[in-house]
Amino acid sequence: MENDYLWDKKGGDAEIEGLESLLSGFKYEPIAPPSLPAAVVISEPTRFPWWKFSLAFAVPACLLFVVSISFWFLRPGRESRAAIPGDEQRSTPNIIRNEPSAKNERETKVTEPDQPVTEPLKPIKTIFAPGRKPVAPRAVRTGHRKPKQQFETLTSEERFAYDQLKLALSITGSKLKVVSDTVNRTED
Amino acid sequence: MRDREIAGNSFFFATPAAAMASERNSTRSKMIAAIKAGDNEAFGQFYKEFAPLVHGILLARLPRDEVQDAVQEVFLAAYRHIGSLRDENAIGGWVARIARNHVVDHYRSKKPSEELQDDIEGSSDRRAEAAEVLDAIRSLPNAYRETLILRLVEGMTGNEIAEKTGLSPDSVRVNLHRGMNLLRKTLGISGAK
């Protein structure tokens, strides 16, 4: 191979040998190594300080957690759900609030609750309890009925449960009404 | 059959080249451990082994009159940072990188200086010719100029260059041949391909 001498100095190449001898004046001349300074501290490889990063993320994460927990427990609507305007009207029934609503007032005027009702009560048709005692209609009943004082002491959770129960009962009632209408129509 | 036996034995017995490499790595590990412990003799051995490599790398980039001092500075820097050497078998490439970084720091911190006409033995024509050839090598791309200086100036073989710098022998061979062709073109030698 032509350039073997260039690789391993085997064989011979006049041109390369000429360059080597020409450049030999620049070759490294061995001299004594530098004396080692006594005070030099050999630096050890430093590892990347991951713990600093983990601290930097852990502290804000803890703060965020504490703030969110505090906000959850101290949020305005938690203690008194009725304090929210509109929510009181929606969730708290008149019976609990012990305040006569406009509708009740109107009904009161119409039915004149101060005087005893002379009109005979009509029995409510029921299909599941034929022998059940008839119940007075709601419009008539509201005028005379005293609100129960025990509902004033309900907490917001209990009121919410009460609302849910009422909703379930109303849904059930409507279903029952549909069934009863169907049965009555069939019977008729 | 005999060839197959020999090939089979190579699985169980290290080849002479592998044994030599293993012994060399072991020696280097001891040398590096001794340097870390502050052993001057081990540092002298390290200096003797790698000074031509560092000198060649610096000669390819720095003015000639500053190369000798720079070699000493590179080795002192290597001593200070010997703790950052992770792969003890790659100490050649590690020292070479320190030398290249030193060149960068040199040109970053100092103004470019005029190179002195130094004391090359021989006639002035020969000195001028040598300086011209060295300048021609320095004008080549980095990979070629380092390899050619280590080969033509420092007198290393291709295998020695590969072993010291951490490059693969094939890369060194390619750099040598392509660099030599470029040098021929630069110098106007007829053998250029």
Image (cartoon, rainbow, N blue to C red):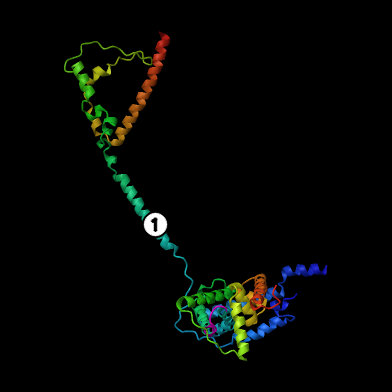
Lateral position of residue B21 relative to residue A154, left or right: right
Lateral position of residue A23 relative to residue B105, left or right: right
Q: Is there any visible trace of residue B153 in the rendered image?
A: yes
- Residue B109: x %, y % from top left: 45, 77
> What residue range appears in magenta?
B60-67
Outermost right residue:
B1
**Rendered position, A96 above or below A142:** below
Q: Residue at x 27, y 42 (%)?
A: A76
Residue in front for this viewpoint, B183 or A55:
B183
Q: How many marks?
A: 1
- Residue A30: x %, y % from top left: 58, 87
Quarter occupied by residue A52: bottom left
Residue in front for this viewpoint, A141 or A18:
A18
Q: Is there any visible trace of residue B37 in the rendered image?
A: no
Q: Residue at x 24, y 27 (%)?
A: A94
Quarter occupied by residue A133: top left
Quarter occupied by residue A72: top left
On the rendered image, what quadrant is the N terminus of chain A found in? bottom right
- Residue B99: x %, y % from top left: 54, 77
Q: Residue at x 55, y 76 (%)?
A: B95
Q: Amino acid at mark 1?
A: Ala
**Rendered position, A42 above or below A187:** below
On the rendered image, what quadrant is the C terminus of chain A found in? top left
